[in-house]
Protein backbone atom coordinates (compact mmCIF):
# COMPACT_ATOMS: atom_id res chain seq x y z
CA UNK A 1 0.00 0.00 0.00
CA UNK A 2 1.08 3.51 -0.74
CA UNK A 3 -0.45 6.42 1.16
CA UNK A 4 0.12 10.14 0.86
CA UNK A 5 -0.89 12.42 3.72
CA UNK A 6 -0.52 16.09 4.61
CA UNK A 7 0.22 17.29 8.14
CA UNK A 8 1.24 20.42 10.00
CA UNK A 9 4.93 21.32 9.88
CA UNK A 10 6.74 19.58 12.73
CA UNK A 11 4.13 16.81 12.88
CA UNK A 12 5.14 14.79 9.82
CA UNK A 13 7.25 12.18 11.64
CA UNK A 14 4.52 11.52 14.22
CA UNK A 15 1.88 11.20 11.50
CA UNK A 16 4.02 8.82 9.41
CA UNK A 17 4.77 6.64 12.45
CA UNK A 18 1.10 6.59 13.51
CA UNK A 19 -0.05 5.74 9.98
CA UNK A 20 2.43 2.88 9.59
CA UNK A 21 1.62 1.45 13.03
CA UNK A 22 -2.12 1.59 12.26
CA UNK A 23 -1.69 -0.15 8.90
CA UNK A 24 0.44 -2.94 10.33
CA UNK A 25 -2.00 -3.35 13.24
CA UNK A 26 -5.12 -3.37 11.04
CA UNK A 27 -3.77 -5.73 8.37
CA UNK A 28 -2.61 -8.31 10.91
CA UNK A 29 -4.00 -11.84 10.54
CA UNK A 30 -3.98 -12.47 14.31
CA UNK A 31 -4.76 -9.10 15.90
CA UNK A 32 -6.12 -6.95 13.08
CA UNK A 33 -9.35 -6.69 11.20
CA UNK A 34 -12.34 -4.46 11.81
CA UNK A 35 -12.76 -5.46 15.46
CA UNK A 36 -9.11 -6.16 16.40
CA UNK A 37 -9.61 -9.91 16.94
CA UNK A 38 -7.89 -11.08 13.76
CA UNK A 39 -8.48 -10.67 10.07
CA UNK A 40 -11.56 -12.66 8.99
CA UNK A 41 -10.89 -15.39 6.45
CA UNK A 42 -11.84 -14.23 2.95
CA UNK A 43 -12.49 -10.60 3.94
CA UNK A 44 -11.28 -8.22 1.20
CA UNK A 45 -9.12 -5.18 1.86
CA UNK A 46 -11.11 -2.11 0.84
CA UNK A 47 -10.15 1.50 0.23
CA UNK A 48 -12.79 2.90 2.59
CA UNK A 49 -11.66 0.74 5.50
CA UNK A 50 -8.04 1.78 5.03
CA UNK A 51 -9.01 5.44 4.70
CA UNK A 52 -10.85 5.24 8.03
CA UNK A 53 -7.92 3.51 9.75
CA UNK A 54 -5.51 6.21 8.57
CA UNK A 55 -7.85 9.07 9.45
CA UNK A 56 -8.42 7.79 12.99
CA UNK A 57 -4.72 7.09 13.57
CA UNK A 58 -3.37 10.41 12.35
CA UNK A 59 -5.78 12.91 13.87
CA UNK A 60 -5.75 16.22 12.00
CA UNK A 61 -3.66 14.95 9.08
CA UNK A 62 -5.31 14.93 5.67
CA UNK A 63 -5.36 11.61 3.82
CA UNK A 64 -4.72 12.74 0.25
CA UNK A 65 -4.22 9.46 -1.59
CA UNK A 66 -4.30 5.71 -0.98
CA UNK A 67 -3.17 3.12 -3.50
CA UNK A 68 -3.84 -0.53 -2.68
CA UNK A 69 -1.72 -3.20 -4.33
CA UNK A 70 -1.96 -6.96 -4.02
CA UNK A 71 1.64 -8.18 -3.66
CA UNK A 72 3.52 -11.44 -3.74
CA UNK A 73 5.83 -11.44 -0.70
CA UNK A 74 8.09 -14.08 -2.26
CA UNK A 75 8.81 -12.32 -5.56
CA UNK A 76 8.08 -8.75 -4.42
CA UNK A 77 5.84 -8.21 -7.44
CA UNK A 78 2.75 -6.16 -6.97
CA UNK A 79 -0.36 -5.84 -9.07
CA UNK A 80 -2.02 -2.75 -10.45
CA UNK A 81 -3.47 -0.20 -8.01
CA UNK A 82 -7.03 -0.98 -6.98
CA UNK A 83 -9.75 0.09 -4.53
CA UNK A 84 -10.32 -3.49 -3.35
CA UNK A 85 -8.11 -6.52 -2.90
CA UNK A 86 -10.17 -9.68 -2.95
CA UNK A 87 -9.04 -12.53 -0.71
CA UNK A 88 -9.79 -16.22 -1.26
CA UNK A 89 -12.32 -17.78 1.14
CA UNK A 90 -9.66 -19.67 3.13
CA UNK A 91 -6.99 -16.94 3.01
CA UNK A 92 -5.92 -14.07 5.24
CA UNK A 93 -4.18 -10.78 4.55
CA UNK A 94 -1.04 -9.42 6.12
CA UNK A 95 0.98 -6.23 5.79
CA UNK A 96 3.76 -6.06 3.24
CA UNK A 97 5.96 -3.02 2.57
CA UNK A 98 3.68 -0.06 3.22
CA UNK A 99 4.91 3.27 1.96
CA UNK A 100 3.63 6.39 3.71
CA UNK A 101 4.67 9.85 2.55
CA UNK A 102 3.71 12.82 4.70
CA UNK A 103 4.05 16.36 3.38
CA UNK A 104 4.16 19.41 5.66
CA UNK A 105 1.47 21.97 4.86
CA UNK A 106 0.38 25.25 6.39
CA UNK A 107 -2.92 25.81 8.22
CA UNK A 108 -4.70 27.15 5.10
CA UNK A 109 -3.62 24.31 2.78
CA UNK A 110 -6.39 22.85 0.69
CA UNK A 111 -8.82 25.68 1.30
CA UNK A 112 -7.85 27.79 -1.70
CA UNK A 113 -7.84 30.82 0.62
CA UNK A 114 -4.70 32.85 1.04
CA UNK A 115 -4.49 35.52 3.70
Image (cartoon, helix red, strand yellow):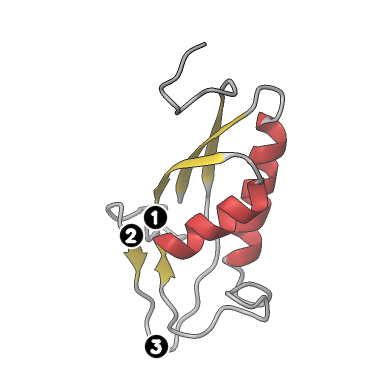
Q: Neighbour class for label 1 at 10 Å: few (<14), some, many (≥20)?
A: many
Q: Neighbour class for label 3 at 10 Å: few (<14), some, many (≥20)?
A: few
Q: Which residue is mark 2?
A: 83
Looking at the picture, does residue 87 appear above or below residue 65?
A: below
**Residue 3 visible somewhere in the drawing:** yes
Left or right of 13: which side holds 43? left
Q: Neighbour class for label 2 at 10 Å: few (<14), some, many (≥20)?
A: some
Dot placed on the residue nearer the N-terminal end, 2 or 1: 1
- Give the quadrant of residue 27: bottom right
Left or right of 66: which side holds 12? right
- Where residue 70 sits in the image (x, y, percent)? 37, 61
Dot placed on the residue nearer the N-terminal end, 2 or 3: 2
Looking at the picture, does residue 18 appear above or below residue 105?
A: below
**Label 2 vs label 1: CA separation?**
6 Å
Residue at 59% of width from left, 24% of height from top? 107
**Disc number for residue 89:** 3
Between disc 1 and disc 3, the foreground one is 1
Q: Which residue is mark 1?
A: 68
- Where residue 67 sits in the image (x, y, percent)? 38, 49
Kindly check if marks 2 and 1 are in contact, taking CB atoms under 8 A apart as contact: yes
Looking at the picture, does residue 54 appear above or below residue 33?
A: above
- Where residue 18 sits in the image (x, y, percent)? 69, 47
Q: Camera-side residue: 108 or 40? A: 108
Q: Camera-side residue: 18 or 56? A: 56
Q: Camera-side residue: 4 or 87? A: 4
Left or right of 80: which side holds 103? right
**Label 1 vs label 3: CA separation?**
20 Å
Amino acid sequence: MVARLAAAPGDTDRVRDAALAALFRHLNPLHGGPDGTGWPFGRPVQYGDVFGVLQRATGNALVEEILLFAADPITGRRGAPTDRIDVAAGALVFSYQHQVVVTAVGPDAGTGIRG
